[in-house]
């Protein structure tokens, strides 16, 4: 950790001695609003401290109890064979540890060539054996909690030191995207085996950064991996994630200059921070959405008319303007915006249509309305407003909603146990991959997550989804997906209230920050101006 | 005296056992599944079952209670569900910031409460006395997390004197990072210390032996320090012992607000994640500290007051 500035230390001591505040100390130095700080040529060097909402609890790609707190740190350390575009400019896959790859015509084999410069942070070159070891671990349910994402993986054959062939049991359309998730990151076999479980206390990977110091509960810092293959980045010497779960405190830390960047700016503070001249608020389009889950096995929600009516009765434009400062987007899918989605001109977003909603309720088995509970995360100002607004919209349909703010543990229990009526299960919901495969299967394919805990199932749509996820090749997949998107929207097992971006805040002199299509950053292009 | 100590220790063990059982039962009553929280909703249900089985969470409640009590009796705190670490290691790594914060907050509360309490007693009935009491009561009424945010806004943002979050180890680092949180928890306690001390001090100052001391021509300072304060301080000591309990509870909120990696924030996290073994361990530790504080307060009183000493020796 670094002290903010010598001035503030001196001032701190002065305060302690006099115990009377003096206003001459002044605030910490922050860059002013001068435009175009980032227009000059990027410079190497410097460091950045980021206040993160979610703490890093584990540095094992196979066990991530800390969720985003874990995967974002792992992304700095481990690189995958192929990556989701780190610039976020496309939802394409780009090279990583492998520089070239090919898929067999039947989709049952993939061949990867390991790039010459791929090197672990201890200076050892990445070998084909390391890749085989890593993928075997990733796909083993006894080792990895992410093994279900390796569906279709059979084995890896080492062709030569720098070539591997992955053999599949069946073609899986989204497999390359699963390989680009950090749980399939490449580990050094010898070092990992030698260290055993303690390997993950200070793991070695071939990503752009290496772990410097991990103070559990407080922060984790990374230093540039000098052996990283890409000579154009990272530009920064070091990056520190500081865990600040409290929303207010995270933004205070940015405003005071304690940190240079914060993730997940709370919606209620977007306006305030935008008005600060020294700060920049940035939006990143990621597959994130307000997931409103309906328990389809329970009374009214088993009726498609009711489900459609509830969605039609929401004034999404109003919600977007009033609660999300216009940063959201009305969806045309029950899933977030994903690759291969048909656009709004082909599948129209659900419009606010109270009359049609009333007609649907009248035609349902509950023409006089019903009573239900809405469970949602407590302590979240945006959701407090959203819940009250939804309650008011649905009252128009004769639906009486009891609001139940709950902590995450209770929500999770009731969600997975199916004991809820209507629920906003997550403060922040996002897909792990930018393609529809993950959530299309969760909702439509029986087993596993019970229709992502809606207990909805439609055999016809299930068959369409299985055909889609078993199809390899972008063009064929693009031809099949929109029909499923439309069918799932029509069936409405759950409601997408709004698509939301990721909102970050940083000081004006932090330049070149980008995230991949799922909102994770490796800070390779980030630099500090002047 | 020794019999007294022995009896007190025995009672403490019984108190801890009771606390352990109550904490266990409360946790059982709270909905939520630590394994689901750890693995998330996107993994297959079979995996959740396997992990539950491995952690012994599928055992009947009484078996779990018995396992947990016998483990504690042998000094083994077990492993954390969430953090994948032994609880000994976990608690040891988080104890420093909390210990500093509680000590710092307590010292501030005693100094400010003590000085203002004596001052208010001497100036009893004046505007100064009135103002001090009103202010202290107002501070008592403000929630500590709110006071913490206001302090961060003023001293951290407007004046830039102290960092608004995080913790730096070592004395200098702790002083920099813990001053605002310590003030936040001390402010609400100042009123408690002040009011108790003021009222007992006032009673003592009106007593005959203080009158007698003054009549002997002792200086006012000596009267206050040797005769009045020594007698007036015993009720305050008992109160401070109780206050330690509040302090430990208060750190949970304050550490969360200021992102201090101490036991308080660990407790909040463990409750959120239903990490039962960690919650139980911290609750017991906090209970042990409160019980120990009560014991120390009794002994201190005995040292200061011969009447208490006699009661203890004879009882």
Image (cartoon, rainbow, N blue to C red):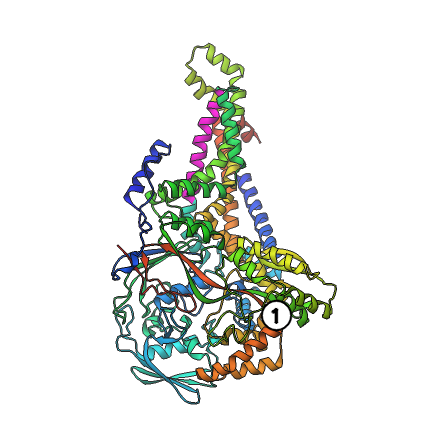
Task: Give the residue furthest to the bottom.
Answer: A105
In the foreground, B65 or A147: A147
Please provide percent x and percent y for residue A285: 44, 66
Q: Give the left or right position of residue A332, taking residue A455 as reference.
A: left
Question: How many numbered discs?
Answer: 1
| Neighbour tally class for label 1: few under 14, some 14-19, many 20 plus, Cα within 10 Å | many
In the foreground, B268 or B219: B268
Rendering quarter of residue A359:
bottom right
Please provide percent x and percent y for residue A257: 35, 49
Please tell me whether residue A409 is drawn above or below residue A493 in the rendered image. above
Q: Main secondary structure of the magenta part?
A: helix
Tell me what residue is drawn at x 68 percent, y 59 percent.
A396
Please tell me whether residue A218 is drawn above or below residue B226 in the rendered image. below
Residue B106 magenta-drawn? yes
Rendering quarter of residue A73:
bottom left
Residue B117 magenta-drawn? yes
SS state under label 1: loop
Please provide percent x and percent y for residue A424: 57, 62
Please tell me whether residue B226 is drawn above or below residue B188 in the rendered image. above
In the foreground, A88 or B103: A88
Q: Quadrant of the C terminus of chain B?
A: top right
Rendering quarter of residue A302:
bottom right
Residue under numbered circle 1 = A454
Which residues lie in the magenta part?
B99-122
Q: Give the left or right position of residue B124, taking residue A371 as reference.
A: left
Please provide percent x and percent y for residue A134: 38, 75
Question: Is residue A36 visible in the rendered structure shown here?
Answer: yes
In the foreground, A171 or B198: A171
Please tell me whether residue B246 is drawn above or below residue B41 in the rendered image. above
């Amino acid at each position: 950790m670094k002290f903010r500035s010598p001035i503030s230390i001196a001032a701190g001591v002065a305060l302690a001695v006099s115990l009377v505040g003096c206003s001459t100390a002044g605030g910490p130095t922050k860059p002013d609003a001068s435009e175009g700080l980032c227009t000059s040529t990027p410079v190497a060097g410097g460091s950045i401290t980021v206040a993160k909402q979610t703490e890093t609890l584990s540095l094992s790609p196979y066990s991530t109890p800390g969720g985003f707190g874990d995967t974002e740190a792992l992304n700095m350390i481990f690189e995958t064979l192929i990556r989701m575009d780190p610039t976020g400019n496309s939802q394409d896959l780009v090279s990583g540890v492998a520089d070239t790859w090919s898929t067999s015509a039947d989709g049952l084999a993939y061949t990867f060539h390991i790039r010459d410069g791929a090197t672990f942070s201890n200076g050892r070159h990445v070998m084909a054996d390391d890749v085989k070891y890593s993928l075997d671990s990733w796909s083993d349910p006894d080792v990895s909690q992410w093994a279900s994402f390796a569906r279709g993986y059979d084995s890896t054959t080492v062709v030569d030191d720098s070539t591997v062939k992955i053999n599949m049991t069946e073609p899986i359309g989204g497999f390359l995207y699963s390989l680009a998730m950090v749980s399939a990151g490449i580990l050094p076999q010898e070092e990992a085996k030698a260290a055993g479980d303690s390997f993950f206390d200070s793991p070695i990977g071939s990503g752009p950064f290496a772990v410097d110091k991990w103070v559990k509960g407080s922060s984790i810092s990374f230093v540039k991996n000098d052996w990283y293959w890409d000579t154009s980045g990272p530009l920064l010497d070091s990056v520190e994630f500081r865990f600040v779960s409290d929303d207010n405190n995270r933004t205070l830390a940015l405003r005071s200059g304690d940190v240079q960047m914060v993730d997940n700016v709370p919606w209620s503070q977007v306006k305030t921070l935008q008005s600060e001249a020294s700060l920049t608020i940035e939006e990143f389009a990621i597959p994130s959405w307000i997931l409103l889950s309906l328990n389809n096995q329970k009374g009214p929600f088993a009726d498609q008319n009711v489900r459609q009516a509830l969605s039609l009765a929401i004034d999404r434009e109003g919600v977007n303007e009033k609660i999300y400062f216009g940063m959201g987007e009305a969806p045309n899918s029950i899933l977030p915006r994903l690759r291969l989605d048909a656009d709004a001109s082909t599948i129209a977003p659900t419009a606010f249509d109270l009359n049609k909603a009333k007609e649907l309720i009248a035609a349902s088995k509950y023409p006089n309305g019903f009573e239900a509970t809405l469970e949602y995360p407590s302590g979240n100002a945006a959701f407090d407003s959203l819940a009250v607004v939804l309650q008011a919209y649905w009252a128009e349909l004769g639906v009486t909603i009891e609001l139940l703010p709950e902590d995450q543990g209770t929500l999770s229990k009731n969600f997975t146990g199916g004991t809820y009526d209507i629920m906003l299960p997550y403060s922040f919901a996002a897909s792990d991959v930018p393609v529809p495969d993950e959530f299309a299967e969760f909702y439509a394919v029986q087993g596993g997550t019970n229709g992502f805990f809606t207990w909805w199932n439609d055999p016809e749509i299930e068959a369409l989804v299985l055909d889609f996820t078993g199809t390899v090749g972008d063009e064929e997949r693009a031809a099949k997906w929109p029909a499923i998107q439309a069918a799932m929207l029509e069936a409405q097992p759950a409601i997408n209230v709004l698509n939301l971006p990721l909102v970050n805040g940083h000081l004006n002199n932090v330049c070149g920050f980008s995230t991949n299509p799922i909102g994770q950053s490796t800070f390779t292009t980030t630099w500090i101006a002047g | 005296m020794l019999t007294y100590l022995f009896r007190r220790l025995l009672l403490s063990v019984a108190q801890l056992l009771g606390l352990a059982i109550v904490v266990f039962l409360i946790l059982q009553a709270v909905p939520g599944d630590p394994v689901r929280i750890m693995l998330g909703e996107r993994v297959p249900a079979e995996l959740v079952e396997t992990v539950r089985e491995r952690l012994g969470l599928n055992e009947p409640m009484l078996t779990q209670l018995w396992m947990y009590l016998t483990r504690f009796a042998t000094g083994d705190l077990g492993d954390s569900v969430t953090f994948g670490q032994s609880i000994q290691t976990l608690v040891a790594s988080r104890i420093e910031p909390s210990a500093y914060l509680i000590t710092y907050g307590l010292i501030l509360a005693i100094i400010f409460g003590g000085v203002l309490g004596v001052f208010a007693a001497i100036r009893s009935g004046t505007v100064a006395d009135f103002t001090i009491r009103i202010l202290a009561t107002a501070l008592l009424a403000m929630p500590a997390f709110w006071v913490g945010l206001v302090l961060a806004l003023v001293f951290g943002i407007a004046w830039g004197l102290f960092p608004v979050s995080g913790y730096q180890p070592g004395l200098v680092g702790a002083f920099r990072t813990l001053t605002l949180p310590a003030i936040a928890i001390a402010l609400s306690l100042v009123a408690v210390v002040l009011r108790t001390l003021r009222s007992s001090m006032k009673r003592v100052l009106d007593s005959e032996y203080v009158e007698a001391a003054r009549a002997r021509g002792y200086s006012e300072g000596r009267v206050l320090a040797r005769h009045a304060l020594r007698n007036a301080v015993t009720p305050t000591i008992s109160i401070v012992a109780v206050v330690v309990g509040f302090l430990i509870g208060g750190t949970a909120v304050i550490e969360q607000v200021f992102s201090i990696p101490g036991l308080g924030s660990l407790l909040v996290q463990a409750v959120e994640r239903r990490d039962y073994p960690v919650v139980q361990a911290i609750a017991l530790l906090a209970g042990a500290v409160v019980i120990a504080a009560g014991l120390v307060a009794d002994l201190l009183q005995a040292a200061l007051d011969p009447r208490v000493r006699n009661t203890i020796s004879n009882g």
